[in-house]
Image: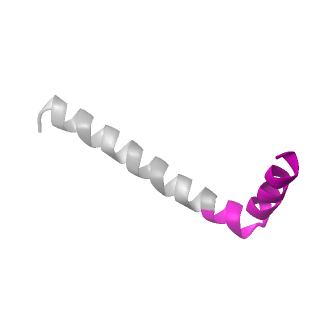
Amino acid sequence: MSALTLFASIIASLILIWAVWFIVRFIQYVGSGEYEMDQRLRDICK
């Protein structure tokens, strides 16, 4: 395996881990009800 392939694999892995973390956090955020609160605050501030 060349150094470039190894580097690309590490970058791809980091992006994949970040994407999974983002999705998990987003599901927790919506599930906790904070999303609805933020929408209400946005409507009040308009």
* Residue plotted at (17% across, 30% down): 3
Spot occupied by residue 46 in the image (x, y as percentages of width and height): 82, 46
Spot occupied by residue 6 in the image (x, y as percentages of width and height): 22, 37
Q: In which quarter of the image is residue 40?
A: bottom right
Spot occupied by residue 33 in the image (x, y as percentages of width and height): 78, 66
The total of numbered circles placed on residues is 0
5 sits left or right of 34 in the view? left
* Stretch of the chain drawn in magenta: 27-46
Instruction: Return the residue found at the far left.
Output: 1
* Residue plotted at (62% across, 57% down): 25
3 sits left or right of 16 in the view? left
Instruction: Return the residue found at the far bottom.
Output: 31
Q: Which of 29 and 40 is in front in this view?
A: 40
* Residue plotted at (17% across, 31% down): 4
26 sits left or right of 10 in the view? right
State the quadrant of the N terminus.
top left
31 sits left or right of 19 in the view? right
Spot occupied by residue 22 in the image (x, y as percentages of width and height): 55, 53
Q: Which of 13 and 28 is in front in this view?
A: 28
Assign the magenta stretch its main secondary structure. helix
* Residue plotted at (88% across, 52% down): 44
Instruction: Return the residue found at the far top.
Output: 3
Colouring of the image: one colour
Is 40 a magenta residue?
A: yes
Residue 20 drawn above or below residue 3: below
Q: Which of 17 and 46 is in front in this view?
A: 46
Instruction: Return the residue found at the far right.
Output: 44
Is 39 a magenta residue?
A: yes
Residue 28 drawn above or below residue 18: below
